[in-house]
Image (spheres, rainbow, N blue to C red):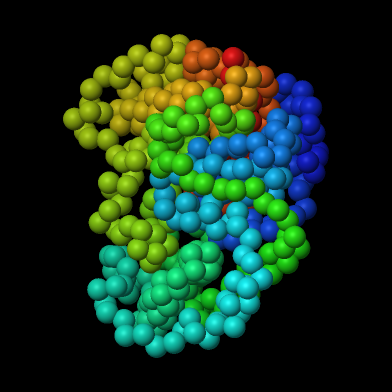
């Protein structure tokens, strides 16, 4: 095993299979502090790739955009950013975090802060579609949140509305009975939580988020656009062979349920409710929503020796989990193929991913993705790893998915 290299920033030139401990001091500059999003990777990674492989006004794509970390770094460096994500909250975060409000818009928000709490007759039908709503929120919190949301949606300026919706989304968990330390919403019986007051927290969040723009008011940012909601099939003929760099962090295998984890926020925003969770989950890469009629059947060959051996071993003890793994790599192969069509020749696809341990079987995700990429028109240019710190991802999976301690950076070259 290589010794850890202590750095604050990843050096431009990295030796193959290097292992880093990145001791970054400030990760919450600009809009990176907006919203506590699970599994977000640190901005140092996309900044390294963007600086190394692109120039101003180049097109940068993140096909699993999440909370927009890559897109924020791209626009700060004067590149134009493209995002793909199926989650509407993610799309909202990406657009909002890559846009600096004008002085007039900031002045308007500050001048109208009391207006966001003005009385509006709220119909209970406008409450979020959350089962056992009063299990998660007090009556007072529900009424205050509903009032703020209604007032925000009455604002016609889209930039202002988006900004306030992100502020609104970021307080929902804190104003609920749900535990603040776990990404997956649950109410702790051992350590019952006292929710924070809605109005005070919303005001504080708006004011703090506005301060994020202070040092960047003179920045000329690149543009941002959401181009698709499916990373497997990005239908944009105008972008074929036009992308200068793709850098992304796809979901881990069987390790995190974004849909359920963000259900409170998405429900309050009106994007989807509890009754929509299962259909939404089916859109995920490597979804766990597999019919028993399917997972009872034998798995097709992947024609990757190490993967087929893993699938055979896991299938003996957990047929469903074996199918989840197969579907994950099948979905990622579709993604790799669609990205190849979009990238310019000799451009790079940088994938940040963690290996997994499922049913006591180690799954070298990064190795398998490299092999898939190499059989689909890519060449491995580099691969290295770094220790995950403060990832807001520490959920035991009862043997179904292991604790991921290292991320691998796979640097692929389109040939």
Question: Could you tell me which quadrant the N terminus lies in?
Answer: top right
Q: Is residue 35 left or right of residue 87?
A: right
Q: Is residue 215 above or below residue 410?
A: below
Residue depicted at 27% across the width and 79% down the height = 123
Q: Is residue 134 above or below residue 284?
A: below
Residue extending furthest toward the bottom = 119
Q: How many marks?
A: 0
361 or 251, which is in the foreground? 251
Q: Is residue 359 left or right of residue 43?
A: left
Residue extending furthest toward the left = 293
218 or 276, which is in the foreground? 218
Residue depicted at 68% across the width and 65% down the height = 212
Percent position of residue 206, x then y: 59, 73
Q: Is residue 50 left or right of residue 198?
A: right
Residue 237 placement: quadrant: top left
Percent position of residue 221, x then y: 67, 51
Residue depicted at 39% across the width and 15% down the height = 302
Residue 338 placement: quadrant: top left
215 or 305, which is in the foreground? 215
| Residue 140 visible here | yes
Percent position of residue 355, x then y: 54, 31
| Residue 364 visible here | no
Question: Could you tell me which quadrant the C terminus lies in?
Answer: top right
Percent position of residue 127, x then y: 31, 72
Residue depicted at 43% across the width and 41% down the height = 228
């Amino acid at each position: 095993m290589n010794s850890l290299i202590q750095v604050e920033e990843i050096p431009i030139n990295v030796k193959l299979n290097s292992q880093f401990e990145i001791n970054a001091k400030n990760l919450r500059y600009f809009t990176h502090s907006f919203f506590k999003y699970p599994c977000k990777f640190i901005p140092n990674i996309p900044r390294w790739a963007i600086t190394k492989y692109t120039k101003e006004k180049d097109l940068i794509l993140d096909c699993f955009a999440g909370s927009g970390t890559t897109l924020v770094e791209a626009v700060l460096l004067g590149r134009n950013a493209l995002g793909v994500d199926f989650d509407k909250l993610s799309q909202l975060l990406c657009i909002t975090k890559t846009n600096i409000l004008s002085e007039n818009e900031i002045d308007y928000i500050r001048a109208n802060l009391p207006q966001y709490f003005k009385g509006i007759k709220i119909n209970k039908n406008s409450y979020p579609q959350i089962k056992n709503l009063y299990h998660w929120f007090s009556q007072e919190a529900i009424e205050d949140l509903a009032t703020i949301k209604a007032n925000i949606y009455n604002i016609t300026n889209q930039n202002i509305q988006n900004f306030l919706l992100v502020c609104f989304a970021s307080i929902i968990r804190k104003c609920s009975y749900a535990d603040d330390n776990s990404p997956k919403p649950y109410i702790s019986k051992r350590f019952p939580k006292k929710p924070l007051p809605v109005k005070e927290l919303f005001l504080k969040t708006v004011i703090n988020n506005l301060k994020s723009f202070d040092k960047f008011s003179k920045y000329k940012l690149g543009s941002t656009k959401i181009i698709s909601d499916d990373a497997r099939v990005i239908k944009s003929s105008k972008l074929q062979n036009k992308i200068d760099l793709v850098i992304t962090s796809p979901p881990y295998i069987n390790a995190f349920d974004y849909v359920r984890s963000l259900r409170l926020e998405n429900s309050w925003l009106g994007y989807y409710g509890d009754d929509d969770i299962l259909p939404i989950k089916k859109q995920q890469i490597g979804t766990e929503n597999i019919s028993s009629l399917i997972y009872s059947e034998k798995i097709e060959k992947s024609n990757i020796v190490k993967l087929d051996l893993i699938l055979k071993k896991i299938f003996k003890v957990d047929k469903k989990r074996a199918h989840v793994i197969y579907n994950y790599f099948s979905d990622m192969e579709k993604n790799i193929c669609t990205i190849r069509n979009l990238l310019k020749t000799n451009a790079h696809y940088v994938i940040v991913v963690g290996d997994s341990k499922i049913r006591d079987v180690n799954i070298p995700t990064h190795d398998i993705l490299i092999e898939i990429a190499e059989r689909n028109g890519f060449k491995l240019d580099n691969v290295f790893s770094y220790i995950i710190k403060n990832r807001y991802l520490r959920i035991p999976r009862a043997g179904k998915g292991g604790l991921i301690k290292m991320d691998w950076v796979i640097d692929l070259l389109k040939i």
